[in-house]
Amino acid sequence: MIKDRHITLAHGNGGRYMRELIEGVFVRHLANPALDVLHDAAPLALDHRLVPYITTDAFTVQPLEFPGGDIGSLAVNGTVNDLAVSGAVPHFLTLNAIIEEGLAVDLLDRVVANLAEAAATAGVKIVAGDTKVVPRGQGGGLYLATTGVGLRDTGCALGLDAIRVGDAILVSGPVGDHGIAVMLAREAFELKGAVRSDCASVLPFTAPVARFAGTHFMRDPTRGGLATVAHEIARASGTDVHLYEAQVPVRDAVRSVCEILGYDPYYLACEGRVVAVVTPETADDVLALWRTLPHGAQASRVGTIEAGRGRVVLETAIGGSRFLEELEDDPLPRIC
Amino acid sequence: MKRSGQAVAERTVSAAEPIPDARGWLERIHALPLTRRVRIMNVCGGHERSISMAGLRGALPSLIELIPGPGCPVCVCPEEDVHAAIQLVFNQDITLVAFGDMLRVPANVPKGEPRSLQEAHAAGGDVRPIASPREAVKIAQQNPDREVVFFAAGFETTTAPVAALLVEGVPPNLSLLLSGRRTWPAVALLLGSEEPCFDALIAPGHVSAVMGPEEWNFVPAEHGMPAAVAGFEPVSLLAALYSVLRQHLAGRSFLDNCYSAVVKRGGNPTARQLLDRAFDTVDANWRGIGTIPASGFALKDELAQVDTLRRFRLDIDERRKRAGQMPPGCDCARVVLGKIYPNQCALYGKACTPRRPVGPCMVSDEGACRIWWSSGIREGRGERAGSHY
């Protein structure tokens, strides 16, 4: 552990302070044989019979810590999940940390510890990294960026182009938890509530399902939520996506906040859920499997791919219907 | 307007019958022997939102038309008030707080000037969205060396908590740019016109919970029109629709209360007392509609020190009341009055979208145009409501 209580610009100067920061925080939590801080680049031991997949993401969440996760666990799971829903098994991550001068070392240490735990849970190694310190006022405390490399079977044919009319749309659990948990953690709008982020690796959900012949497509409904994934499917496949309001799992606490602020839960971010498009014959097998997993009890068939022209239709609980449009702008709380 | 003292009348379903669920009410409505078109106005933007989000129009018999009414506080907030708020942010070193919806409402300004509080914020002004009046006090307390202006636009439901703050006493650096309105006078105005554009009324649930359902007795008593107070779940709205349709068919009008779990006789006496202690009732301007008698809340004289206009010696420019109603081509006024549907405005979805709203009804989640757009209605002029799907 480093002696200083707050990060200063000196921790980014390349000298002794920086070495202390890297060794005292990052290496202490993330050490593994592949993370060699003495070299400028790391070799990747890949199985050449498999197809390498790569993805990258940046994380700027505020606040840095929220019920159910923090920016560290998010930085791992966000990138792991992008690989997982592509049908790949994640193996390696790189990590960039852009730290604002004045950040409490204790907080940084907690974040990196949670990041290490999330990486261990997902079975990925951090193989390269970098830190920078920016002057006070020029960053949100801490920004993280991760790049992930995974491997996918050559026989795997998941993709938007595999989607067919008649396919079933499944979600692995309640939607909107992450979006509402982070919003509540900001303590804006004087709202309080016991909603925890669903931030987690979705690998246990995706790895077995990717091997099913009837699985056509998977995606994690992060920013923009379920409705945005539905739009991506509808636009890419030229079909209509029908969602069933009564079947979409939404926690009561999430629904209440949505009602107060006028949000639509279908547009709220998840960080530990999967949307899968599968043949109708496969749907029950996938749901049965998902429901045996932790956080999978509420897995549900929420919709169907129908012939059409790229629209997303919500069939409402009372037997009506409306279109779910693409997210227009940042929702602001409504007046009454 | 003479207020009728008659009590809220009988229920449509007797206590012995089980209360139907939403689908049960729908079945009953479909079983009614309707032969002619029935136009039902819902006053409240919250009702319009529930109706659109539940896809109710498409599920009802085609003879039933649901007409969104004047119940969007953001839509009817006078343009001169929005303009004054923007000018304050620009010309004074203050923090302005307002309910989120107000931030995007466009004012009529020359090209190049910020046309909304959101644009004023982007140009460097200190504008913050809040969701409850208490946040305004908190922000003022956290910034004791700074003047904080609370732009309080809203109906009885949002103005009552503002009254509570005033009665408790607010920090000396907090002032109020008040644009509070009462809902029933706007409906009275519509019913007083030569040919009302609707045959029955769904009265607002939250307003009735605060002010008492009796405020709406004048609809059946003085105009012979069926009326029912509804809540915001589809089941409550459907019960209210069934009630007014039954009244309409029977030719016998009364005020039904289909939100009796929340709406009690006399409303919320505490909230009403607070409103009476803090405010006088005055004639007030409604954007696009004009002055409606006894429809506005104004600060009592003894609360003059919290009046933003006095504190900053601002005069509302009387000429703006004419010049700055709705922007050219914008039909928000007729949308608010229930005379046309949102998609009958020539600008709907063309020049006017949520991304670049021309009129206030495309801004707020309580605004009919915004709600219709959010629920996916893209077809333009001439479409009958509900035929979008």
Image (cartoon, coloured by chain):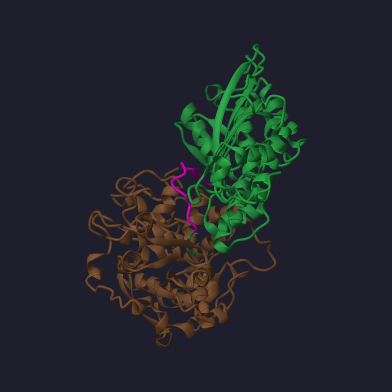
In the picture as drawn, the residue positioned furthest to the front comes out as: A16
Up-down: is B190 above or below B20? below
| Left or right of residue B52, residue A27 in this image | right
Find residue B172 and report its horizontal and vertical position in percent. 46, 79
**Colour brown maps to chain:** B
Q: Is residue B293 visible?
A: no
Viewer-side residue, A320 vs A328: A328
**Colour green maps to chain:** A
- The part of the chain drawn in magenta is A320-333
Find residue A200 and report its horizontal and vertical position in percent. 68, 39
Up-down: is B16 above or below A103? below
Q: Main secondary structure of the magenta part?
A: loop
Find residue B133 and report its horizontal and vertical position in percent. 51, 70
**Residue at the spot x=64%, y=12% of the render?**
A48
In the picture as drawn, the residue positioned furthest to the right comes out as: A292
**Residue at the spot x=65%, y=55% of the render?**
A253
| Left or right of residue B12, residue A323 in this image | left
